[in-house]
Image (cartoon, rainbow, N blue to C red):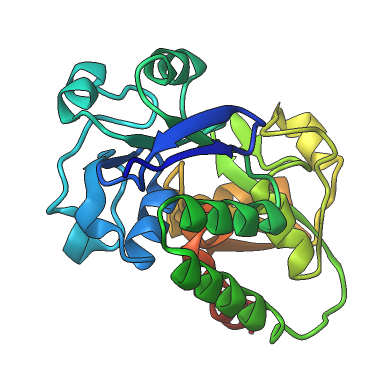
Amino acid sequence: MTNIEQHTDQLGRLLTIIDKPQRIISLVPSQTEFLIAIGLKGRLVGITKYCIHPAELVNEIPQIGGTKNPDITKIRALQPDLIIGNKEENRKEDIDDLSKEFPLWLSDIATLEDSYDMMLKLGSICDCKIPSEQIVAEIKSNWATIPYSEIKEVLYFIWRKPYMLAGNDTFINSILQKIGFKNLIDQARYPDMDEVALKKLEPELVLLSSEPYPFKEKHIKEFEKLFPKAEIKIVDGEMFSWFGSRQVLCPDYIKDLKK
């Protein structure tokens, strides 16, 4: 008997899914990792070339291009019964095109709570409710072990030339707040700023992300000149920006970082 279900994604878009999806395409690396974590590796028929975790499993799944330039022809050939994307990581024109032909569920994540909501909803849609609930519970439990600390004023860089930073309505900002840091960037999303504007901010701590720009130790001197009074650290960008099951690991990483 055919089972028809209607679901609403995180943008309030209504989609109809016939039976539980068996041929899933993920357009978002962090969500691919989560889908595999709840037992859906065998149902993933396509992922992006940036879906790198878990490394021992993703190599067995066909690639359908990048997050910003998916191969629409290849996606059509795979005949998915569910495509999972993200408002920020995927282009609107690609989402609009694919939505005309396939059920497409979009996440829109700016906070940890949004991430929890995404995992629980996808778990329900894909008939993996229990493992998704277990992952969310584990993340919450791990975050509860982070001790309170004095608030530090920080800047979180995601790019150089131009300098780009995480703003106040991003998932990164949500993580900064969770660990007791105050983001000095009031602007939304990922503003770019010149050296004159940056020097006026006087942060106590400057975090240089390993992605999307691959900041390395060699860049630290450049930022020491910009912020002579600040502590400069390279951080694992995945821990701060990958929403989903990666967050199970984040609290322990933060504990080590604070040391």
Quadrant of the frame with the N terminus: top left
Horizontal and vertical percent position of residue 7: 56, 39
Question: Which residue is drawn at the image coordinates 58% and 29% (left, top)?
Answer: 14
| Number of numbered discs | 0
- Residue 119 picture quarter: bottom right
Query: Quick one: 242 or 62, which is closer to the camera?
Result: 62
Q: In this view, does 176 lie to the left or right of 214?
A: right
* Left or right: 100 as drawn, with respect to 188: left
Question: What percent of the width, then of the height, locates residue 74?
Answer: 17, 23
The residue closer to the viewer here, 223 or 52, is 52
Quadrant where the image shows the C terminus: bottom right
Above or below, comparing residue 72 to residue 199 in the picture: above
State whether residue 52 appears in this view: yes
Report the residue at 51% width, 59% height from top.
Answer: 244
Residue most toward the left?
A: 60
**Residue at figure coordinates x 82%, y 82% from the top left:** 148
Q: Residue at the location (56% across, 79% down)?
A: 138
Residue 259 falls left or right of residue 84: right
Asked if residue 143 is positioned above or below residue 192 in the image, the reply reads: below
Q: Is residue 172 left or right of residue 83?
A: right
